[in-house]
């Protein structure tokens, strides 16, 4: 029997896990897989369920650490959320404006989505005080981007570093509607303002420089809110006061998780992989557009709609890739896939340029610095720029000792680079993958067994 491609090593004195990956003589990635539920949609289903009247049923929820943080926060404010599983989660909502003041700090863990969207909801609860925080990574991520528009609506918020860093305290208010022109394309900023606008009397609009993911707009509408969008001006409007009613939500597979296998199967010779039931919302499919432009062999099969979100099966076969330039309005449509796209660029002929991606510096890690430094340890030629990366492709990679920087997307992107490298790659702090993809290592092993 050939040696396993991936072995795990857990540290006896910490929560750390190390992955050792050696593709050895393994042939390509072949078979049919499914990826866990979409993280963005899972958060929103739990949150809207908690603030809607009646029962929400969620099928296909992501069982990652981030949705667990969301569930814990809303349970602490009185929402009844059943035990989390992928089959059926029920949420008994309290109704808009009815969350209880918690007698504990609300801890969003590693999850920017939990913290920022929740702030929008909490700001509209008059006479209640909420304290919110997160782990070391989240406490260093910018919250001023949400504080500014919420204050414009009348919210009272205090925090560290001029009220821009968690822990933050929020005293809820009767909010006023606003038209907020966001300087950044961010679904979290947009969603926080729209959620705050649910109880403000009149129209609350967010305009952004480029269109970010629209899961909140879709789901708010499905729950009964009046939401309009103008794609021309990248604007979304909610009319308050709204009423939300519990719904049945079917969470599709996460395209951000599928992205790892799309890149792996594209660059590892002799691959032919079918990834079933992947969400293909057009605000998320920049990864498909770019991989196709690079020459990847990807086809969409069985396209359909599930609970207001487009879904398809994705077939990917290995092919020769060529370099490309990734910049401008496509960036928000693939923002979380840039680390793994950097791995695809290593296998591509020519120099790939990634620009306008400075937002990556304020994610769970500085993702530009993290991916460039770790891929270079494996022999890649990646240069960091202020807002992106320059990647000279066509070279080989050698296994090396690398680190996730406790960032789930860096851990898994390095695992895909390891499949393309010769020798063994050791990835430290790989447990971070559980934030969005707890069964990533199992799927990797299953593809080579
Ligand atoms: O939730 P969090 O920690 O911010 O997660 C990330 C990720 O890689 O999983 C970003 F680090 O995804 C964000 C994404 O980058 C999830 C998200 C959403 O669900 O609304 C929107 C994007 O962030 P932003 O800042 O562009 O709005």
Image (spheres, grey):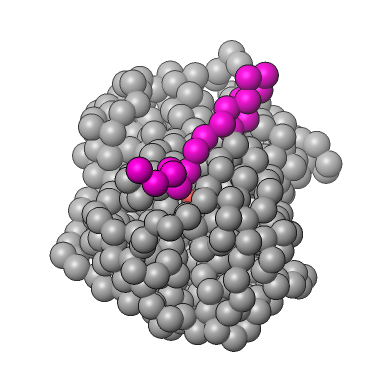
Q: Nearer the viewer, residue 430 or 435?
A: 430
Q: Where the N terminus falls, by quadrant?
A: top left
Q: Nearer the viewer, residue 167 or 6?
A: 6
Compared across the picture, whether 116 is left or right of 384 comes to left
Q: Quadrant of residue 394?
A: bottom right
Q: Where the C terminus falls, by quadrant?
A: top left
Compared across the picture, whether 123 is left or right of 59 comes to right
Queried whether the magenta region covers residue 11, the answer comes back as yes
Residue lying farthest to the right in this orientation? 161
Queried whether the magenta region covers residue 96, the answer comes back as no
Tell me if residue 370 can be seen. yes
Q: Position of residue 156 (x, y in %)?
A: 68, 37
Residue segment shown in magenta: 1-17
Compared across the picture, whether 358 is left or right of 99 comes to right
Q: Position of residue 81 (x, y in %)?
A: 35, 23
Q: Residue at x 75, y 69 (%)?
A: 384
């Amino acid at each position: 029997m050939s040696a396993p491609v991936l072995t795990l090593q857990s540290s006896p004195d910490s929560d750390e896990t190390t992955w050792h990956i050696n593709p050895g003589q393994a042939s390509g990635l072949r078979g049919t897989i499914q990826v866990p539920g979409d993280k963005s949609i899972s958060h929103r289903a739990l949150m809207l369920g908690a603030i809607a009247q009646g029962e929400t049923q969620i099928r296909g929820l992501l069982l990652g650490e981030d949705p667990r943080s969301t569930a814990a926060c809303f349970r602490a404010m009185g929402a009844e959320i059943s035990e989390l599983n992928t089959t059926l989660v029920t949420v008994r909502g309290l109704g808009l404006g009815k969350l209880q003041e918690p007698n504990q700090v609300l801890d969003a863990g590693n999850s920017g989505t939990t913290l920022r969207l929740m702030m929008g909801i909490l700001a509209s609860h008059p006479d209640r005080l909420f304290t919110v925080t997160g782990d070391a990574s989240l406490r260093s991520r910018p919250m001023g981007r949400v504080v500014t528009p919420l204050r414009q609506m009348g919210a009272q918020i205090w925090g560290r570093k001029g009220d821009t860093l968690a822990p933050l305290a929020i005293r809820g208010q009767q909010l006023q509607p606003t038209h907020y022109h966001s300087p950044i394309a961010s679904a979290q900023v947009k969603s926080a303002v729209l959620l705050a606008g649910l109880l403000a009397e009149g129209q609350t609009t967010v305009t952004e420089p480029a269109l970010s993911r629209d899961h909140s707009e879709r789901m708010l509408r499905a729950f009964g809110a009046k939401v309009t969008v103008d794609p021309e001006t990248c604007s979304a409007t909610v009319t308050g006061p709204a009423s939300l009613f519990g719904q049945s939500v079917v969470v599709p597979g996460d395209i951000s998780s599928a992205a790892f296998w799309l890149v792996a199967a594209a660059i590892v010779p002799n691959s032919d992989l079918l990834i079933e039931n992947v969400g293909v919302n057009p605000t998320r499919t920049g990864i498909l557009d770019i991989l196709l432009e690079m020459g990847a062999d990807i086809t969409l099969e069985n396209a359909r709609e599930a609970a207001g979100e487009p879904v398809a099966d994705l077939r990917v076969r290995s092919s020769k890739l060529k370099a490309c330039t990734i910049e401008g309005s496509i960036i928000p449509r693939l923002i979380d896939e840039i680390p793994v796209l950097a791995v695809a660029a290593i296998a591509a002929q020519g120099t790939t340029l990634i620009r306008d991606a400075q937002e990556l510096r304020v994610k769970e890690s500085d993702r530009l610095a993290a991916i460039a430094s770790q891929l270079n340890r494996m022999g890649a030629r990646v240069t960091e720029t202020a807002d992106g990366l320059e990647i000279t492709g066509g070279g080989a990679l050698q296994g090396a000792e690398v680190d996730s920087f406790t960032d789930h997307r860096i851990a898994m992107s390095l695992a895909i680079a390891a499949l393309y490298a010769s020798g063994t790659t050791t990835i430290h702090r790989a447990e971070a993958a559980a934030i969005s993809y707890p069964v990533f290592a199992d799927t990797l092993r299953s593809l080579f067994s």
